[in-house]
Amino acid sequence: MNQLEIKRFLAQHEPDRGRTLVVVDFGNVEKWKQNLGWQVGIQELANLVKNLSTGKRYLRRFYYGSDYGKSERSTILDPWSKGVLTRAYTNGFEVVSKRVKYIHSADSVHGFEKKCDLDVEMSIDLVKECDGYDTIFLFSGDGDLMYAVEHLVRSYNKTCYVMGARDHIGREVFDAKQNGIVKDIFFADDFEYRLDMHRSRRRR
């Protein structure tokens, strides 16, 4: 998809912006850099999202874990985690978060793995807010949400688009497109000129 095709899609989508729910699974989005070779910026992401959804903040939803460190008693949020959540909110997102778990792992050089799965929260919110939108735009290549999306498409006539890194999209998403559940899949690779957090520096 080239820049002209992207502009055409955004223009066609314009009438639907007020009834579009954007779901950003930022834990998944962060992992795209492994395939992309560049990192999606929160401000850049927010600017694109404003072209997809307008109106109330609850239609632009950002899901990410709150990392308080290994101690379950800690009340101090990790600076990186705090920075991500703060930037998301100040850029117009409704932020949904829960505490990151530290799980012991003998296979990890650190002795632990971090886990914070927000799929349940995303699925419930998709259903709970269904009266307020007609179109779903999902920023995540994870196929786990396709069960909820299928219910919303078949039972409530919703339309769903998915964006993910080209080599970071689950088989379930492609199957959902083939079965008419997902209307189209967009590849973040094609949106580098809009999403790369360092794009302005690269143009110098």
Image (tube, rainbow, N blue to C red):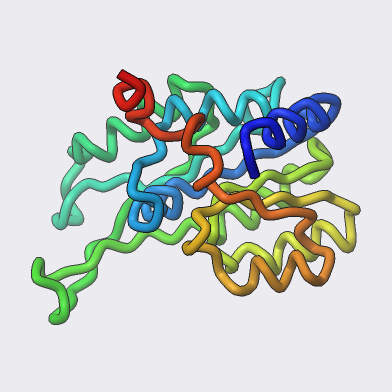
As drawn, 119 above or below 128: below
Left or right placement of residue 113 versus residue 89 in this view: left
Left or right placement of residue 7 versus residue 199 in this view: right
Q: Nearer the viewer, residue 49 or 79?
A: 49
Q: Residue at x 33, y 29 (%)?
A: 198
Q: Nearer the viewer, residue 158 or 191?
A: 191
Residue 199 at x, y percent in the picture:
37, 28
Which residue in the rendered view is the most extreme toward the bottom? 106
- Can residue 98 be seen in this snapshot? no
Q: Quadrant of residue 59?
A: top right
Residue 171 at x, y percent in the picture:
60, 74
Left or right placement of residue 55 versus residue 97 in this view: right
As drawn, 161 above or below 193: below
Q: Residue at x 79, y 32 (%)?
A: 13
Residue 2 at x, y percent in the picture:
63, 39
Quadrant in which the N terminus is drawn: top right
Quadrant in which the C terminus is drawn: top left
